[in-house]
Amino acid sequence: MKKWNKALASALALTMAASMMAGCGNKTGQQPVAVDGTAEEQTVTEQPAETETPAEAEYWFGEFDVMALEGKEYGTDYESLYDHVGKDITIADVTEDPDTGFAYITVDGEQKLLGLDFLSFAMVYNNTPAGEYETEDEVYAAWWKYYITRWNALLPEIPLYSNEYYDLYNAQIGQVKENPTNPYWQPCYALIDWTSSKDDASIIIGNTTEASGQFRYATYGKSNPGASDHDIEILTSGYETVAMNKEGGYEWNDTVVESHEDVVNEDGTKTFTITIKNDLTYSDGTPITAKDYLVFPMAFYSPVATQASGRQVNGQTVVGFDDYNAYTGPDSTEGSKVLSGLRLIDDYTFSVTISADYIPYFYDITYAAFSPAYPAMWLGEADILDDGEGCYLTDNFYEKDGENYKTAAIINATATDTSEAAYAKYPYSGPYMVKSYDATDSSAVLVKNPNFKGNYEGSVPQIEKVIYKKIVSATQLEDFKAGGLDLISGITGGAATDEALALADGSNGAYDYIHYSRAGYGKLGFRADYGPAQFSEVRQAIAYCMNRGQFAKDFTGGYGGVVDGPYYTGSWMYQEAVKQGMVLDAYATSADSAIKVLEDGGWVYAADGSEYTDGIRYKKIPGDIITEDDKNYQSVDGTYKTTEVNGDYYMPLVINWYGTVDNEFTDLLQTGFKENENIRTAGMAVYNTTGDFSPMLDELYQASVYGYYSGSPMYCAFNFATSFNSAVYDYSYNLTIDPSMYEDYSQFYLKDFADIYWINK
């Protein structure tokens, strides 16, 4: 189930990028998300007489409806519009405002604007062709277009650059241009189609992250594996039933799957039945059977593996998961020994049944994605059986030594042992095998698996040996020229790119390069439920004040540009949405535009509640709905504070921004954002603190995930990056206003008022 949990130190910390990956989550009955918009599509609380001026009447709606959720009970006072009516809506029920591009539906005889939560769910779960849309892809692209349009209007973060990446390589590595990398198809996938004319037919790959040696299961016990660990896990694992292709999508792996079928059952569940080919083997020649594909879920859906790793692998999409996950062994008083949603049908056939709560789903092929695992690695001496009701593990899997499961020790040893003996203990299913790992220089050597039949296209490796080594960016080109590297991937930025290209162009053919656009962007992100940044007009005003095009040019050295939303221009859905007429606001630089949206949003006061004339603007927030954190909001130095006047509060338009140190992005924001003259002209001020990345994340989360948060919020703006590492685009759950989910799963800390459905008006 796709969940983003800060308590598990989300993928945001991985290479300073928040990976918006796809998932298998579906909404079962909870969700709203909120932030801003116009008055007409939202039920409003009673308006005090003193707010009847046109400017205040406009800003009273929307954001203040979201604030009014304070003290209200989800499911009693309000719910999400999607929970209320979403599953019954088709794309044919939607009307589009030709001026704004916003999407509307009619509910209870009233036109309702569709918010980000509704659209994020409809995008992946409401894909039945209807009206003018003849295919699921067309329907998905239409919902996606509405989602991006709404996102662009609410602007939960401001994209500032999308750079180009260059991969520099030794020309002795062949077939690279014929089989290039791209944002989804990194070298760990692409090199299976490459060749090497070096004497030992090897390739040496540099990576700035240190390999830990944890290659069997790179994320075991942690949320942020090093890129090298992750790459090596990919290179040594294979024969997946559903494979990611070169475009980042997913398809059945014809090298592995003999046949497959899927059936929607009478109860709304969906069963995928998969027969694998009977000639697959591990690297040591051991046959791979259907049972091997069930090893990982059977082990890691259990409390045994949870005890071993300290983390729960979620499988809520599978029928029977909750009961199976609660079963602790033969003496268990709760749960079920049997995982009814997994079936072992014969030696080469198995099935998985997905809960009706998660069907239909645009990416439902990912539910059928299984990979083989050598049983002894994760099960020890235990076995998987099926007596006709579902799969179960033999009792010895649950044997204990006191309070500890004995099998947990086996699992832990398999995942974390980095000795040469450990790498040789169990065979591999992928194109390569780990031969050695040297902790002193964080290098690993992989050799070709002679029994590997091929990837999803049937490609088998031609390169005999792959060496991963730790590199330092400042010296990587010298290392490359000296022959210590054959590939440097992901070179970006003006000076670094210029130097790499000059080296290749002047090498008389010894070196070459390929390049691709980034699927992602560097951004100014916000804690969009706190301080001035919680109001869309403030985020919009910041965008109007900044010259994003020039910022992108300056930061990338001309090797990049800027996008206007959370998308990759090379993705199929972006191209289809453009065909469908998507038009986004580019927020052309204009102090006048910034002032206009701020005035319309109610930033028309001085600190004492009088009319604004100059200096810092203030906004009036009714005292009965303002939060304690917002009452205490002030600039970092305390110069400007939220003031109370006659029971109402006036918040200063000061942005407390946290930037990371030793970061050119932060450095450029000093002039592009903090010292921006348009910011001052608009009546705004920016206060800046710099520090390390982990403390910044704690401030963003407003939680002590990494042990740095003081307990009192201060910052509402942050700079980091987002990357789309898969063509699966699914933000469901990430825009919720359900209090039980919001803190752990909210992607932008954004609540879209349009998603609120008031049960008790």
Image: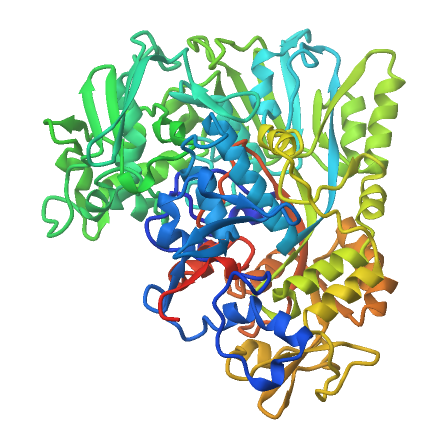
Q: Nearer the viewer, residue 578 or 315?
A: 578
Q: Mark yes or no: residue 751 visible.
A: no
Q: Is residue 19 above or below residue 630?
A: above
Quarter of the figure with the N terminus: top left
| Residue for point 83% across, 63% down | 592
Residue 613 placement (x, y as % from top left): 83, 81
Say whether residue 240 is left or right of residue 50.
left
Q: Nearer the viewer, residue 675 or 111?
A: 111
Q: Is residue 365 above or below residue 197?
A: below
Residue placed furthest toward the bottom: 646
Say whether residue 618 is left or right of residue 82.
right
| Residue for point 42% across, 9% down | 451
Residue 390 placement (x, y as % from top left): 16, 31
Q: Is residue 163 above or below residue 642?
A: above
Quarter of the figure with the C terminus: bottom left
| Residue for point 48% across, 75% down | 45
Q: Nearer the viewer, residue 747 or 42?
A: 42
Q: Mark yes or no: residue 251 visible.
A: yes
Say whether residue 554 is left or right of residue 290.
right
- Colouring convention used in this rendered image of the protein: rainbow
Residue 558 placement (x, y as % from top left): 85, 36
Q: Tell me how many marks there are.
A: 0
- Quarter where residue 228 is shown: top right
Residue 195 placement (x, y as % from top left): 63, 9
- Quarter where residue 493 is shown: top right
Q: Nearer the viewer, residue 50 or 571?
A: 50
